[in-house]
Image: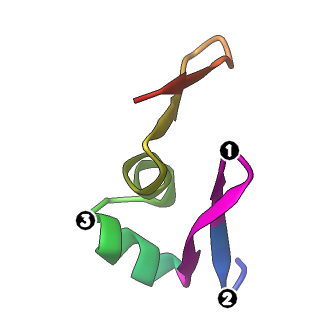
Amino acid sequence: MAERIGFLARGRLVAEGGAADLKKRAAAPDLEEAFIRLTGEDFKKDGKEEAL
């Protein structure tokens, strides 16, 4: 796994750090949930983006 991860939303970097840091910052159990919480974006099951 990468040491540093960046979350992009609509072409902007909204969060950056290690996996543990991003999960802690978002109070999330995993990186997928951290992405959703920090970017405000989710993905429907059919693959289409859905803004929260």
Q: What separation in Å lies between label 1 and label 2 (alpha carbons)? A: 23 Å
Q: Which numbered marker is on residue 27?
A: 3
Q: Which residues are magenta?
A: 7-18
**Callout 2: few (<14), some (14-19), or many (20+) C-alpha neighbours within 10 Å?**
few
Q: What separation in Å lies between label 3 and label 1 (alpha carbons)? A: 22 Å
Spot occupied by residue 29 in the image (x, y as percentages of width and height): 32, 59
Where disc 3 sits, the SS reads loop
Q: Amino acid at mark 3?
A: Ala
Q: Above or below — where is 52 with respect to 20?
A: above
Which residue does the image show at 39% across and 30% down from the upper left?
A: 52
Which numbered disc flags the more N-terminal residue, 2 or 3?
2
Which residue does the image show at 55% across and 84% down from the upper left?
A: 18
Judged left or right of residue 33, residue 1 is: right
Where disc 2 sits, the SS reads loop
Furthest residue toward bottom: 3
Corner quadrant of residue 25 = bottom left
